[in-house]
Image (cartoon, rainbow, N blue to C red):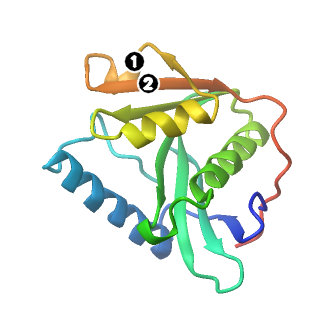
């Protein structure tokens, strides 16, 4: 899929080793921010509940730069999970490109509402979702009783046209 001139974004299985390494890096960063490993309410995403998983690569070198996924919440609703960009590649619009590609894939998969959550130690996540057009909603699912969680939602309609690259 193409959303950024210097990126190649590909759909991948949850078990993809590159995706696994990117997710591990994200979790290590979140563990450091929160000071422990118990910062995810509810169950962690898995291959069984994942609707879509994407990996972003630098077009000229093939170097993986980031990832993101959508977890099923209901038949036409999914939650953004594991959007992550390697620290040295941040600030170049990669995360926004991943989110745009996820929304386009959501639309083609019949998903009409995308949800997201940012925790209290993630002010960058809050700004990221708000700048992408997500609006605050009441906390949902495992975040319902958590004051430190900020939840967001965005209807998915008329997506930017991006197309999956076999991979």
State the count of labels: 2
> Would you name the residue on which mark 2 appears?
151
> Would you name the residue on which mark 1 appears?
139
Q: Could you tell me which secondary element the residue under label 1 belongs to?
A: loop
Where is the C terminus found, in terms of image quarters? bottom right
Query: Residue 87: horizontal and vertical position, in percent?
Result: 42, 66
Q: Is residue 28 left or right of residue 87?
A: left
Does the image show residue 79? no
Q: Could you tell me which secondary element the residue under label 2 belongs to?
A: strand
Seen from the viewer's position, the closer of residues 88 and 78 is: 88
Query: Residue 142: horizontal and vertical position, in percent?
Result: 32, 26
CB atoms of marks 2 and 1 within 8 Å:
yes
Which residue is located at x 72 percent, y 46 percent?
105
Which residue is located at x 63 percent, y 25 percent?
154
Which residue is located at x 28 percent, y 52 percent?
30
Seen from the viewer's position, the closer of residues 115 and 129 is: 129
Identify the residue at the far front of this view.
Answer: 91
Could you say which quadrant of the image residue 27 lies in? bottom left
Query: Residue 134: horizontal and vertical position, in percent?
Result: 59, 27
Seen from the viewer's position, the closer of residues 144 and 59 is: 59
Please tell me how crowded label 2 is: few (under 14), some (14-19), or many (20+) other residues with Cα within 10 Å: many
Q: Is residue 42 left or right of residue 13?
A: left
Could you say which quadrant of the image residue 132 lies in? top right
Seen from the viewer's position, the closer of residues 34 and 68 is: 34
Q: Is residue 159 above or below residue 161?
A: above
Please tell me how crowded label 1 is: few (under 14), some (14-19), or many (20+) other residues with Cα within 10 Å: some
Query: Residue 108: horizontal and vertical position, in percent?
Result: 79, 41
Does the image show residue 85? yes
Q: CA distance from mark 2 to mark 1?
A: 5 Å
């Amino acid at each position: 899929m193409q959303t950024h001139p210097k990126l190649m974004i590909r759909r991948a299985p949850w078990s993809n080793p590159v995706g696994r390494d990117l997710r591990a890096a994200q979790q290590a960063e979140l563990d450091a921010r929160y000071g422990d490993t118990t910062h995810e309410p509810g169950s962690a995403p898995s291959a069984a509940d994942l609707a879509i998983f994407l990996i972003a690569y630098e077009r000229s070198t093939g170097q993986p730069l980031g990832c993101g996924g959508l977890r099923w919440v209901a038949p036409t609703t999914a939650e953004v999970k594991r959007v992550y960009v390697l620290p040295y590649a941040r600030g170049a619009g990669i995360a926004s490109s991943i989110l745009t590609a996820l929304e386009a894939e959501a639309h083609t998969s019949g998903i009409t509402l995308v949800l997201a959550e940012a925790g209290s130690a993630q002010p960058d996540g809050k700004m990221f979702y708000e700048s992408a057009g997500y609006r605050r909603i009441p906390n949902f699912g495992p975040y319902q009783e958590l004051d430190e969680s900020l939840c967001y939602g965005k209807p998915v309609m008329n997506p930017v046209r991006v197309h999956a690259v076999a991979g």
